[in-house]
């Protein structure tokens, strides 16, 4: 349970880091992309009866389009925005997206079948749902693909150049506005993947984005803002410690564990577990 939760937090944290690395923006609407991915997957598979694989990609594409629209309509038109203005914009977008999700999908929770059955598997004496294996495998694939994209593709290198010095990247001929838009699309896609793979286990509703976004943000900051590996590591640790806290202390305090761990990490190591390039941003927050 802790690992599966940790994988979700890690995916959400990766979404935060993709945008932060390219733009310096903390997107507080990231949790809503998780919700949109999960709810669209429910619509495609349960309501329209489509197979899982094409529904998976269509739901991710849908969330990426929403991410692009968000950047084009709210972030891009603002000239020389301050960090506070950007935070307010993303919070406002989050509220609007939540309202739209409630209008389209209603207030109730939505169920989706497991990818490959819901019969628990016995592993080393513990019972493990097959969906948990899907979650772990997909997180591993996403981490590998993201590392390859940013290290070995020209587009990924251009996005990294924008994150280091946007003005210099523009002088080198890089279309910085396109890179910002692409970062929002990729971030929305990562969030949608998290929503799709967790929906069979927790069910999805329009209001779940706030708590998932908060915990993903906690993982991103605790891991070192801007560090994808740190976000994954912190997300997994957060999920495991949260499950242990719920089991050994009380399940009522599980949702508070993210904030407690975040505060402890910031007191001991303000730059995060793998803090480096994002240390300045963490201090500003």
Image (cartoon, rainbow, N blue to C red):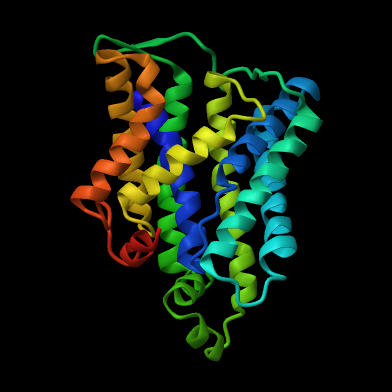
Task: Give the x, y percent position of residue 87.
Answer: 56, 57
Task: Give the x, y percent position of residue 118.
Answer: 51, 12
Q: Which of 80 and 236 is in front in this view?
A: 80
Residue with the most extreme left position = 268
Q: Nearer the viewer, residue 276 or 179?
A: 276
Residue sitting at 52 percent across and 89 percent down?
172
Task: Give the x, y percent position of residue 213.
Answer: 51, 40
Residue sitting at 59 percent across and 77 percent down?
176
User: Residue 271's image quarter?
Assistant: bottom left
Left or right of 22, for residue 243: left
Task: Give the x, y percent position of residue 219.
Answer: 37, 43
The answer, for residue 105, to whether it is visible in the render is yes
The answer, for residue 141, to whether it is visible in the render is no
User: Residue 27's image quarter?
Assistant: bottom right
Residue sitting at 42 percent across and 76 percent down?
164
**Quick check: 228 above or below 215?**
below
Q: Nearer the viewer, residue 51 or 263?
A: 263
**Quick check: 216 above or below 71?**
above
Residue sitting at 45 percent across and 71 percent down?
160
């Amino acid at each position: 349970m802790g690992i599966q939760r940790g994988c979700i937090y890690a995916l959400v944290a990766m979404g935060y880091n993709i945008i932060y690395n390219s733009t310096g923006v903390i997107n507080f609407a990231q949790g809503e992309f998780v919700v949109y991915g999960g709810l669209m997957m429910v619509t495609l598979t349960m309501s329209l009866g489509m197979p899982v694989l094409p529904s998976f990609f269509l739901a991710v594409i849908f969330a990426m389009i929403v991410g692009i629209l968000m950047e084009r309509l709210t972030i891009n038109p603002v000239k020389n925005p301050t960090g506070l203005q950007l935070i307010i914009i993303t919070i406002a977008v989050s509220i609007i997206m939540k309202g739209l999700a409630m209008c389209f999908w209603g207030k109730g929770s939505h169920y989706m079948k497991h990818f490959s059955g819901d019969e628990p598997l016995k592993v080393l004496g513990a019972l493990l749902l097959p969906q948990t294996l899907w979650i772990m495998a997909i997180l591993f694939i996403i981490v590998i693909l993201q590392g390859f994209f940013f290290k070995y593709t020209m587009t990924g290198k251009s996005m990294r150049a924008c994150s280091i010095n946007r003005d210099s990247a523009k002088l080198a001929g890089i279309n910085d506005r396109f890179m910002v838009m692409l970062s929002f699309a990729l971030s929305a896609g990562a969030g949608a993947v998290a929503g799709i793979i967790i929906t069979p286990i927790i069910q999805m509703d329009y209001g779940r984005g706030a708590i998932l976004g908060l915990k993903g943000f906690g993982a991103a900051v605790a891991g070192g803002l801007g560090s994808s590996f740190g976000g994954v590591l912190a997300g997994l640790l957060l999920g495991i410690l949260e499950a242990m806290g719920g089991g050994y202390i009380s399940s009522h305090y599980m949702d508070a564990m993210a904030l407690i761990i975040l505060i402890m990490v910031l007191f001991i190591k303000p730059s995060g577990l793998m803090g480096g390039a994002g240390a300045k941003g963490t201090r500003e927050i």
